[in-house]
């Protein structure tokens, strides 16, 4: 299965856009005195809705169909299950290896970060852990773009929204420790570049062996990664801001947007 250069270039572009949105978070951090919890709660719920819907309603069924055509219904289902839980296991392992105290998803708002001690150390460790988290997200965005742009574009938007508070978590402690907006911005920006790096690694190691079967298994794994991110990171983070109903409204709206987007492309 050969991918044309334009498709690969678009996939890299989308992954790059998703990654650099950490820089948007850093810019927000410089001008915001307090976190807009209403916006973040809604936006994180929206991102989760997009990822959950597209995983269960598009990526997993597409994976199952391809694997069933190749191996039969029962064995195809088994391989799809292996791919799904393999993706969950990968991102879960990464989360497990990152100490809870240094995990960017344990951070809160701008005002809390300003009161944090050992700020420079916190910012650097947060940047490293975000880069580690973003690596499989880059693979997910890139691989989804190779399969379907209709699926990849909303996934890119969802991951970009998800990366904005991560950019805040890096930029605020660095800025308040050093007084340099430039250092804070570039470190935050660099942490997001792990996503296009993940895409590059996927391209170098997987593209030579690309086939309908590999594509289907990776689709299932990407679905697993996104389901885990939604349930372990996005929805709990939305809840932390104390805006339960806004996060649920965002979740449902994200599902609806994804549903109608896919419907229009049938």
Image (cartoon, rainbow, N blue to C red):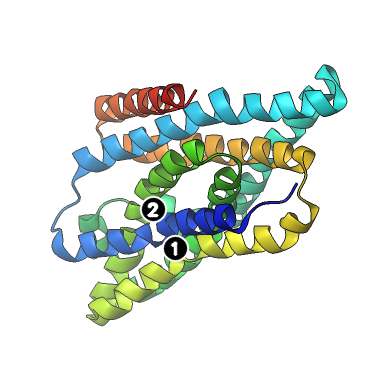
**In the figure, 260 relative to 26: above or below?**
above
Instruction: Describe residue 55's horizontal placement relative to residue 24 as left or right.
Output: right
Q: Nearer the viewer, residue 140 or 119?
A: 140
Say whether disc 2 or disc 1 marks the residue closer to the N-terminus.
2
Q: Nearer the viewer, residue 52 or 260?
A: 260
**In the figure, 107 relative to 27: above or below?**
above
x, y percent for residue 132? 55, 61
Residue sitting at x 69%, y 42%? 218
x, y percent for residue 239? 33, 34
Residues at circles 2 and 1 in contact by the CB criterion of under 8 Å: yes
Q: Which mark is residue 163?
A: 2
x, y percent for residue 65? 71, 24
User: Dividing the picture into quarters, in which one does residue 89 lie?
Assistant: top right
Instruction: Describe residue 181's horizontal placement relative to residue 49 as left or right.
Output: left
The furthest residue to the top: 73
Q: Which mark is residue 192?
A: 1
Query: Which class describes the residues within 10 Å of circle 2: few (<14), some (14-19), or many (20+)?
Result: many
Residue sitting at x 27%, y 66%? 172
Q: Which mark is residue 16?
A: none
Residue sitting at x 37%, y 41%? 237
Q: Secondary structure at mark 2?
A: helix
Residue 146 in sight in this render: yes
Residue 133 in sight in this render: no
x, y percent for residue 82? 76, 34
User: Dividing the picture into quarters, in which one does residue 256 lie?
Assistant: top left
User: Dividing the picture into quarters, in which one does residue 233 lie?
Assistant: top left
Tell me the CA gap for discs 2 and 1: 8 Å
Residue sitting at x 55%, y 38%? 228
């Amino acid at each position: 299965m050969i991918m044309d250069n334009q498709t690969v270039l678009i996939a890299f572009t989308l992954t790059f856009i998703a990654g650099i949105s950490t820089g948007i978070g850093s810019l927000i951090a410089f001008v915001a005195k307090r976190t807009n919890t209403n916006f973040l709660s809604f936006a994180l719920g929206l991102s989760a809705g997009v990822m959950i819907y597209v995983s269960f309603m598009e990526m997993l069924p597409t994976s199952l169909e391809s694997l069933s055509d190749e191996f039969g219904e029962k064995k195809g289902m088994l391989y799809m299950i292996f791919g799904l839980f393999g993706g969950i296991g990968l991102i879960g392992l990464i989360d497990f290896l990152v100490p809870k105290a240094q995990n960017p998803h344990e951070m809160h708002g701008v005002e809390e970060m300003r009161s944090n001690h050992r700020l420079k150390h916190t910012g650097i460790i947060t940047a490293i852990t975000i880069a580690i988290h973003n690596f499989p997200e880059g693979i997910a965005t890139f691989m989804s773009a190779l399969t379907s742009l209709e699926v990849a574009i909303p996934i890119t938007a969802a991951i970009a929204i998800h990366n904005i508070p991560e950019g805040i978590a890096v930029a605020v402690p660095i800025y308040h420790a050093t007084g340099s907006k430039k250092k804070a911005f570039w470190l935050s920006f660099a942490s997001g570049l792990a996503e296009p790096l993940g895409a590059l690694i996927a391209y170098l190691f997987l593209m030579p062996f690309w086939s309908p079967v590999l594509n289907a298994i990776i689709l299932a794994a990407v679905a697993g990664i996104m389901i885990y991110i939604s349930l372990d990171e996005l929805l709990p983070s939305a809840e932390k801001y104390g805006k339960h109903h806004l996060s649920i409204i965002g979740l449902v709206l994200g599902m609806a947007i994804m549903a109608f987007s896919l419907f229009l492309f049938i």
